[in-house]
Image (spheres, rainbow, N blue to C red):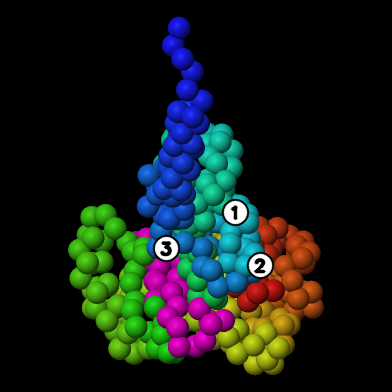
Amino acid sequence: MRKSHPVRRAVLAGAATVSGIVLLLSLKPASDPGSAQAAGGQLPPAAAGQAPQGGVNGAVTGDAAQTQYGAVQVRLTMSNGKITQAEAVQAPKGGRSDQITAGSVPRLNQAVVAAQSADIDAVSGATYTSAGYKQSLQSALDKAKASAGAAQGSGSAQTLTGDVAQTQYGPVQVRITVAGGKITKAEVVQAPKGGRSDQVTSASVPRLNQAAVAAGSADIDAVSGATYTSAGYKKSLQSALDKAKASAGAAQGSGSAQAKTVTGSVAQTQYGPVQVRITVAGGKVTKAEAVQAPKGGRSDQVTSASVPRLNQAAVAAGSADIDAVSGATYTSAGYKQSLQSALDQAGG
């Protein structure tokens, strides 16, 4: 029989214990971004298109994005700069679109909250709806970013997207960057396309962009041969400038009595677009007006009878919770939708 050596066993056990302690101390937790990625952890989304971390609170409604099957418009609810809820206030409907919308929109809403940005995947089988959703979502994020920038001081750059202007040859939409109260960049996010429009757009848009930066306003000349595109550009540019003005007013303090003008997004109705502009002072709506409303034929009579009453109701209520005007159901619905968009931007 082999003799037992208690001393030897004790030495070996002690050495093993020391080695184990050294090995444990040499291990580092994967707490840095690189280690987290290597371990399969998720990194925060990229800064581009990300929800602004400037303490933004409340609802922000993006511009309506026109798709082949109808308009898509996204509203975000934010708390301390984070997206807590996303919803589609407009989406394609009727026929097959009802099924596609019901199957895709909830998934897109969930993806936005998870990603905290517009960098989300399209839903299979809902390509057009997904593209429109992402476009309107980016617009909402731009507005939230502008609000966050305004709150941090007028010297910071803001990006603002104007409302869509419908022209005879297609929609035009302008996005501007403002810093120190001046336009530093202008670009078109939508413009007429297809056939002759491609040539007209490529020739006119760069010149319009340059003119907007040089003038610092929407008082720019139309480009020869691009009358409709120029008119749409100026209209959307003015909308973006209105939003910049509203943000600048907000930066001076919510308790300030200074009036600010905010233009809501365009609401498409069965009889034509409706768009509302409001003036807010001291946290109250002091004026409401329709800058677009259905027109032509019977619509002229309906508009002239209903819009003044809707304007009065908006000022009296100070909200979009107003009654529809009898005989003007579609105009009233569009008015309330655009009014809510303007109130969202004003922070009301």
Q: Residue at x 43, y 45 (%)?
A: 22
Q: Quadrant of the N terminus?
A: top left
Q: Residue at x 46, y 48 (%)?
A: 25
Compare residues 20 and 287 and report the one nearer the observer: 20
The vertical placement of 335 against 21, above or below, is: below
Name the image quarter holding residue 256. bottom right
Residue position for label 1 = 86
Q: Quadrant of the C terminus?
A: bottom right
Q: Amino acid at mark 1?
A: Ala
Question: Does 134 appear in magenta?
Answer: no
- The mark total stands at 3
**Mark earlier in primary sequence (2, 3):** 3
Q: What is the distance, in whole Å, between disc 2 and disc 1 at their CAs?
A: 12 Å
Question: Does 160 appear in magenta?
Answer: yes
**Mark earlier in primary sequence (1, 3):** 3
Extreme residue in the top direction:
1
Say whether residue 140 is left or right of residue 338. left
Magenta-drawn segment: 149-176
**Mark earlier in primary sequence (2, 1):** 2
Q: Residue 39 at what x, y percent from top left?
A: 42, 42
Q: Would you call the spot at circle 3 few (<14 residues within 10 Å), some (14-19), or many (20 or more)?
A: few
Say whether residue 286 is left or right of residue 299. right
Q: What is the distance, in whole Å, between disc 2 and disc 3 at their CAs?
A: 21 Å
SS state under label 2: strand
